[in-house]
Amino acid sequence: MVRILRKIKSAAVNPLKSSQPLGAAFAFLGVEGAMPLFHGSQGCTSFALVLFVRHFKEAIPLQTTAMDEVATILGGADHLEEAILNLKTRTKPKLIGVCTTALVETRGEDCASDIANVKLKHAEELTGTEVVLANTPDFGGAIEEGWAKAVAAMIEGITRSGARTRQPKKIAILPGCNLTVADVEHLRDMVESFGLNPVILPDVSGSLDGTVPDRWVTTTYGGTSVEEIRELGTAVQCIVIGEHMRHPAKTLHGLTGVPYAVFQSLTGLMAVDRFVSLLSAVSGAAVPARVRRHRAQLEDALLDGHFHFGGKKIAIAAEPDQLYQLATFFTGMGCDIAAAVTTTDMSKILQKVPAEWVQIGDLGDLEALAAGADLLVTHSHGRQASRRLGIPLMRVGFPIFDRLGSQHKLRILYRGTRDLIFDVANIFQANQHAPTPEALDPFRKREMPDELRSSPLTRH
Amino acid sequence: MTSLSAKIQDVFDEPACDNNRGKDAKARKQGCSKPLTPGAAAGGCAFDGAKIVLQPITDVAHLVHAPLACEGNSWDNRGAASSGPTLWRTSFTTDLTELDVVMGQGERKLFRAIREIKDTYAPPAVFVYSTCVTALIGDDIEAVCKRAAEKFGLAVVPINAPGLAGSKNLGNKLAAEALLDHVIGTVEPDDAGPYDINILGEFNLSGEFWLVKPLLDRLGIRVRACIPGDARYIDVASAHRAQAAMLVCSSALINLARKMAGRWDIPFFEGSFYGITDTSEALRNIAELLVRKGADAEILERTDTLIAEQEAIAWKKLEAYRQRLQGKRVLLNTGGVKSWSVVHALMEVGMEIVGTSVKKSTVEDKERIKRILKDENHMFEQMAARDLYAMLSKHKADIMLSGGRTQFIALKAKTPWLDINQERQHPYAGYDGMVELVRQIDLAIHNPIWDQVREPAPWDRQPAGQDDLASTKNGTATVNVFNEFAGATAHRFGNR
């Protein structure tokens, strides 16, 4: 049983979280022709925009209803209406994804009926543009919750409901926000290699993969099409990656009856084996030779790599599903989780994290708990802690703003697990300490068995 | 909120601002914030502006009283440099939860947060920032700060600039007001001297003020406070004992300069350290102001000697780039001071300015640009992304200098681009800084990637050699074609 240690501090020190509306916007960015819209003051958008740009090194479509003092007092419905109409005229998006912020949620605005009114009043003008709403106050959740809410909102708002004729080869895939562009690309290849036809929502591999279009586009270009979202109900099976995507899958199931299977992680040999078996069962096809080859490569990577992992102490700070994905990977390689920090206590996956305890908190907590660890695993903001502690940092998640190509790192399926083993083993090898007589002196360095695995809880 | 409204009125009515002086009484009362268009707005909020101005004060704990987004999405994101303390890069926020908001626990949480920071980090001061939500739920941060200051014997400064108050620029000014109300003048220095100056609005981005400070050191001029770049709390608190001040980024902190002049008799001038002649002019102005305040006049001559010596070195260094940059066309797409400051130096090495944005420039700035450019058509207020892209993709400029916001317009149009705003990696101030800027322009324009990315893929090129390909039916021909392509590849990428 994992102990969940709740936050007791009043001052968050070096936040681990990015905000919930940012997570929702992120999901909308995986849809073709999309324009996420923050309903709040212009700073809410500006901060999220800058963070996205720093991470993806791309122009990011993201707009604001620009709530000012007057709108805050009188209500923001007019601003919302004006913003939707302006966006429609200026950028002709296929989807406007409204994400609320703490400002309008604190006011207690009924944005759902505001949007319904706008749609009713301007039905003709808004033809060809879907407008959906994700209620994402900044004072709750983090990226995962925002991402999942946006996907559920798109399914609720766009997907045609009712039992439909199922297309036997069509698979709906709802990936969690911890999958990179490379992950989604590879996932598609894998599913297609079984002769199946995957529809992935959201599909950041089409929109945030860093390409050079031959014209200037103000919305997203690439990603899941609105038409594909509308027709999700004809899939024969829905596959969910990450516990936080269970809710959108339930929504889809409720609307259309498409059955779903949840994979909490696709990293690690056994998790991938289960996934591949499912694909084989659904498609009725044998596992292709190339996939078998990748599995064999992973087996070899496990054999070659495990020397570097055994007994290493890992300190991870990440959103719940990513924490689970990485913690199970590391323990599966023979490491111990010395510290596990996450953003919110709302996720059921935390109970399955292979650690004695999980701290709800921030990078200040990680820094305090990670002393003596061999590796820090978190996003770029862990760089200060890494320097101060003298422990190498592996960058994962969002944001990664001081390294290039984070979205092209493959972390799932046989090949992604193989790459992850190599990347981590290389960090360990690059940070090896040469043996010294002092460090090896038996009279200085002798630990008694009960000291070997002292509970990290004693540090609290 | 009433005191905030009064503050906003006050900073909008800025007598030292050229724009404001040009307005009639009614227009002046409306302030200078243009109403934002929902769905078509860009830029940061007042909180953003306040934090930008204050955060580079390096030994202060900056505590943001807000739900997560205000701080969590924005911390440790600017390139100001510190020569010592790193506390300013540690992020503090009350990270309000739904429960805190609903139960009205904000003020208590804030008070406890201040105590935790004091106990763990013992900073000389805590700056507490209000934000939209905490303003909306009516948390009285001034009262909490006052109480915490008394209880903990520590400077706790309320920064009242919630995002909904307005733009980033307004936030800059509200931050200055907070310094005037709560910080500057609270500590009496024991070492005030006749050569003490303040530099206001210098952010020490990429450490660039360190390219200038040695010049002042050489002249025996002491920087009492550089606000905010690489500042310590005590420097700011005792800044009122300087003899003179230079205002660097004029639109941001003009109220600070003017009020310090009025309150403590610290005359100031607006200047820039971007560009060679501008740096010289700034040094000369500093010396003159100090002499006006009673310093020995011999400093003027020493300043001129230093300027002559440094300018000669800089121009000589720049001359080396003339041949490579002669006739290259520059598009400057950035606001205010930076535009005209660098124009002169770029033209000096033979570059041509094909356009400059004057969105943030004052009337005086525009006059200067006109004089230098000799063609008004090259000035534009603001260019839409689509137009900018069209212009660049037709290769009407060899490089664009701008901020991160338009970076990808240039890059997607396959045009060299150089960041000259706050996220940039290189220091451009002073004499050496201008040489560095020109060096970076040279590196950007002449990077070999441009030839590679501008060339279409071989199969997308004009169908000149298509017939040959179609006729390669027999084995020998196929091998020949293979060799030809292999050779071409090796030649293009391998033998540069």
Image (tube, coloured by chain):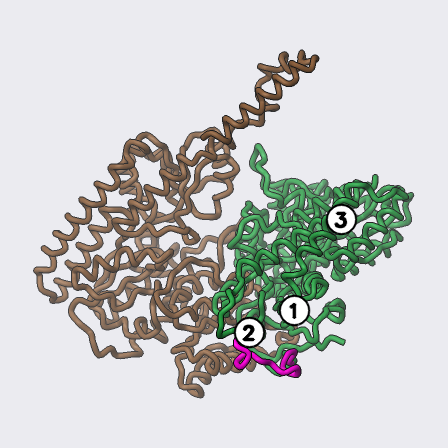
Chain colours: A green, B brown
Say if the magenta span includes residue A451: yes
As for residue B85 lying within the magenta part, the answer is no
Side (left or right) of B301 relative to B168: left
Residue at 49% x, 53% y is B43
Task: Tell me how far mark 2 sits from mark 3, CA to CA.
Answer: 37 Å
Amino acid tagged 3: Ala
Which disc is residue A296 wearing? 3
Q: As rendered, which of B166 and B59 lies closer to the eye? A: B59
Which residues lie in the magenta part?
A: A440-454
Q: Residues within 10 Å of mark 2 (few under 14, many from 20)?
A: some
Disc 2 marks which residue? Answer: A371
- The 10 Å Cα crowd at callout 1, few under 14, some 14 to 19, many 20 or more, is some
- Closer to us: B175 or B199: B199
Left or right, A277 with respect to A39, comes to right
* Residue B364 to residue A104: above or below: above
Horizontal relation, residue A73 to residue B33: left or right:
right
Marks 2 and 1 share the same chain: yes
> Which residue is identified by label 1?
A311
Report crowding for label 3: few under 14, some 14 to 19, many 20 or more residues within 10 A (C-alpha): some
> Which mark, by number, is residue A59?
none
As shown in the figure, which amino acid type bears the numbered disc 2? Ala
Identify the element where label 3 is drawn: helix
**Predominant SS of the magenta segment:** loop
- Mark with earlier residue (2, 3): 3
What percent of the width, then of the height, locates residue B456? 55, 27
Question: Mark 1 is on which residue type?
Answer: Gly
Q: Nearer the viewer, residue B364 or B66?
A: B66
Distance of label 2 from label 1 (alpha carbons)? 16 Å
